[in-house]
């Protein structure tokens, strides 16, 4: 550690102590008034930042959610959307936090958070919130509520919002998936037509459990299903910098696996 690093570490420790002592809006003021709020947010432990957001009120601090790293944001979703181990993720909470994280002026930052999410979680969200019509295979139907339906950016799908979350947030998710990679976004939406929600929920739960186990320094092996056989695998976590593509991109490329669990490390 250099002499220049010392004051920064002391300052961070002091800020963390101040955040712990502050209440509600005071926490927000401490972060926003910092010389570099983004750097401060990214330097905080994910759990500590999440509880600070709960104390402030997430709706009152969307700028802090937008500043969070993809890893911190995944922790937010993990804590907020999974109410218990026996329940699947709550679409309303997923969309709420996705809306809070989406800063129109920082589109790349939000897409980085989106790319870090597991394919199973995204697919389950799409399955629960949207009814998908493939216009290359069927005539355009008449949506029950035309005001809650829209076409995918490539014009291939008619997507009808049937969920309990936020329509605008869901539409933005679809648009941002396409902005990252139109082909792979189309494959992900196409999978909604044949994926079983119960299997997706079970896989999402297993992936979540694996990540939590690995976070504690353990090793975990899981099964990855295909239509004909199951393959088991296990292994240590590799550095994040070695993963060339987002989780949902790699999963969408494998059209032979109707139900699968995306690896949490890069291969």
Image: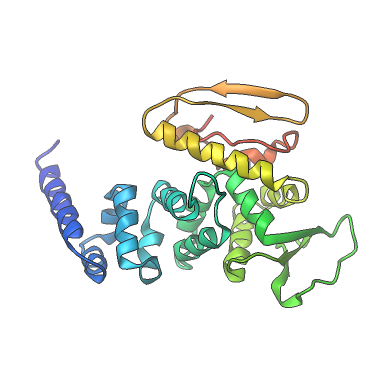
Question: In the image, is 63 to the left or to the right of 27?
Answer: right
Asked whether residue 160 appears in the rendered view, the answer is yes
| Residue at screen point 28% across, 54% down | 39
Rendering coords of residue 83 (x, y %): 48, 52
Question: In the image, is 248 to the left or to the right of 32?
Answer: right
Question: In the image, is 259 to the left or to the right of 101?
Answer: right
Q: How many marks?
A: 0
Rendering coords of residue 248 (x, y %): 60, 44
Rendering coords of residue 195 (x, y %): 73, 45
| Residue at screen point 65% across, 36% down | 260
Find the residue positioned furthest to the front: 86
Asked whether residue 245 appears in the rendered view, the answer is no
The quadrant in which the C terminus is found is top right
| Residue at screen point 31% across, 51% down | 42
The quadrant in which the N terminus is found is top left
Classify 141 as above or below 91: below
Q: Nearer the viewer, residue 87 or 36?
A: 87
Classify 145 as above or below 249: below
Quadrant of the rendered image containing residue 129: bottom right
Quadrant of the rendered image containing residue 217: top left
Coloration of the structure image: rainbow
Find the residue positioned furthest to the bottom: 147
Q: Nearer the viewer, residue 143 or 68?
A: 143
Rendering coords of residue 199 (x, y %): 67, 41
| Residue at screen point 33% across, 49% down | 47
């Amino acid at each position: 550690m250099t002499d220049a690093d010392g004051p920064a570490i002391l300052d961070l420790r002091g800020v963390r102590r101040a955040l712990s002592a502050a209440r509600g809006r005071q926490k927000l003021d401490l972060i926003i008034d910092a010389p570099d709020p983004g750097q401060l947010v990214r330097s905080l432990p994910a759990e500590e930042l999440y509880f600070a957001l709960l104390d402030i009120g997430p709706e009152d601090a969307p700028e802090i959610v937008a500043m969070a790293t993809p890893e911190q944001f995944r922790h937010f979703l993990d804590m907020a959307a999974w109410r218990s181990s026996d329940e699947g993720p709550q679409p309303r909470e997923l969309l709420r936090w996705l809306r809070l994280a989406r800063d129109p002026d920082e589109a790349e930052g939000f897409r980085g958070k989106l790319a870090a999410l597991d394919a199973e979680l995204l697919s389950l969200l799409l399955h629960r919130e949207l009814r998908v019509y493939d216009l290359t295979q069927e005539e355009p139907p008449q949506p029950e509520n035309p005001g809650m339906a829209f076409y995918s950016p490539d014009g291939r799908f008619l997507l009808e919002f049937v969920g309990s979350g936020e329509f605008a947030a869901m539409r933005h998710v679809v648009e941002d998936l396409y902005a990252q990679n139109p082909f792979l976004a189309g494959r992900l939406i196409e999978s909604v037509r044949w994926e079983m929600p119960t299997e997706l929920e079970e896989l999402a739960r297993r992936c979540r459990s694996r990540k939590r186990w690995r976070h504690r320094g353990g090793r975990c092996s899981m099964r990855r299903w295909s239509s004909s056989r199951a393959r088991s695998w296990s292994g240590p976590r590799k550095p994040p910098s070695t993963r060339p593509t987002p989780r949902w991109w790699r999963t969408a490329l494998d059209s032979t696996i109707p139900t699968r669990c995306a690896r949490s490390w890069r291969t």
